[in-house]
Image (cartoon, helix red, strand yellow):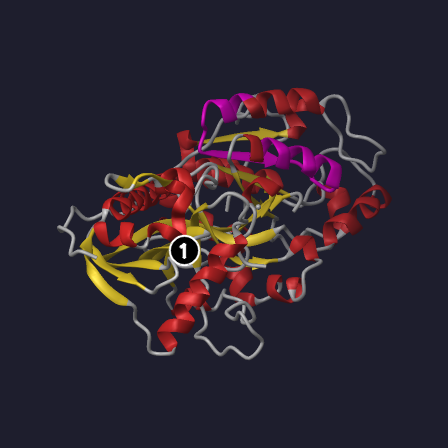
Amino acid sequence: MASGPARPGEARPRRGELGGGSRCYERGRDRTRPRAAAPPPRSAPAAAALTMNRGFSKKSHTFLPKIFRKMSSQSAKERPESLQFPFLDDEDTISTLKESKTFFILRGLPGSGKSTLAQAIQDRYKDACKVISVDSYKIMPAIRSSIPEEYSKVDEDLVDYCKRDISIIVLDDTHHERERLDQLFDIADKYRYKVIFAEPKTPWRMDCSQLKEKNQWKLSAEDLKKMKPSLEKEFLPMYFGWFLSKRSSENLRKAGQLFLDELGSLKAFKKESKYFAFAIEDPKVKVDLTSYFVKRPPGVLHCTTKYTEFGKAPGAEEYAQQEAVKASYGKGFTLSISALFITTKTVGARVELNEQQLLLWPGDVDKLLSTDNLPKGSRAHITLGCANGVEAVQTGLDLLEFVKLEKAGNKGDEVGEIGGGKLQYFDNGMWMLVLSKKIEGRDVLVSTQKESTLPDNV
């Protein structure tokens, strides 16, 4: 669809589009005319990769189908429809994921094609990817009252890959139990991994009579039917959003820091520093905005598209079922950042959405009052920091205040140029740097499930 996630509205990718977004699964809730300065660094595309799986090899794994031997040489056109995903076919998505840290959590009944999909991902990302197949740990899928102790070894190997910063980690299991998913969300959150859910597209994936013949565990149709209900229901995240690659996040943070440093040193800003009173150490030197905006979002930055609250938020299921969202989930995009801004409460980046990205933007978040009629996408932003006691959701609301002023004809007083853009002052401690050259950031549409990355649009 802050120091936690951003509720509806935050952004970024490069030459990709919002395809197959990525759901991050989280529980819980996240003057005087100045001299021209060097422009902020442009966000270069970031990359990431993950791989390696204990006991998972073409020679040693007794359950691997022979099709795996041919898969690495198959092009997207030759690949069966059941293996056509943005993260396998779209080059922009692939390069962005290689620059990121991502868990692929494969879900589905035994025999539905998860291991084939896992091998396709490994073949596509090669050394950047590690696969953990629960089959190789001899853990039989079943309906059970508690998670088997054998999973401790699975998690031990998973954490080892996380500590090694493997870019792509594929988890091949049925994943029909919420308790087990929560354990994986905790690990992903701790080591700052995004989560992408993927399910096989095979025609027989829910046909228990066929799966009975295909599953390697020789489970009966009745055994499979017991697991089926938990896999039929759409698993909705805390929120959907565009998550920047690691490199793009770092570049945007640097641009934001440069903006704060230069702004805090300007005479024009210091004349209005009453709005940031407790950040002033020596008015003759600078206003310490870095200390003022003490709350910074952890890990990679993101732009929230839709806050779904695990399906409880209004319009959550309808949003997740949109064809544009389904097609874009897990796909790479490029977000354009047109401005940086601060208020007395937040500092953020303004995201300019293109036509394809606007298809993924909910229609009910671009307003402060029910009577507001602002352009779609007005709230799209990335939170860079918040003042003490302020939540990340405030960043989008602050941006809407700027948009309302602009719509009313108030473009702000032009103060001068800093950091490669024109600085404007809107009174009441509201400053915006309109960039002369937009910053582009590569990202992937995903979803999140943990509180540590709270959404900015609610």
Give the quadrant of residue 134. Answer: top right
- Which quarter of the rendered picture does the N terminus lie within? bottom right
Q: Position of residue 338 (x, y in %)?
A: 30, 60
Q: Which residues are magenta?
A: 160-188
Taking 168 as reference, is 209 left or right? right
Quick one: SS at disc 1? loop
179 falls in the magenta region: yes
| Residue found at the far left of this picture | 35
Taking 28 as reference, is 243 left or right? left
- Which quarter of the rendered picture does the C terminus lie within? bottom right
Q: Position of residue 47 (x, y in %)?
A: 36, 39
Front one among 245 and 95: 245
Q: Which amino acid does the dot numbered 1 rest on?
A: Thr
The residue that mark 1 highlights is 343
Number of numbered labels in the structure image: 1
Residue 320 seen in the current view:
yes
Give the quadrant of residue 54. Answer: top right
Quick check: 98 above or below 339?
A: above
Q: Position of residue 150 (x, y in %)?
A: 73, 21
Tell me if mark 1 has few (under 14), some (14-19) or many (20+) residues whose alpha carbon lies within 10 angstroms of its own.
many
Residue at image x 56%, y 47%? 454
Front one among 381 and 70: 381
Residue at image x 74%, y 37%? 179
Q: Position of residue 187 (x, y in %)?
A: 60, 31
Residue at image x 28%, y 49%? 270
Taking 305 as reference, is 217 left or right? right
Residue 93 seen in the current view:
no
Taking 386 as reference, is 201 left or right? right
Front one among 230 and 264: 264
Residue at image x 79%, y 51%? 229
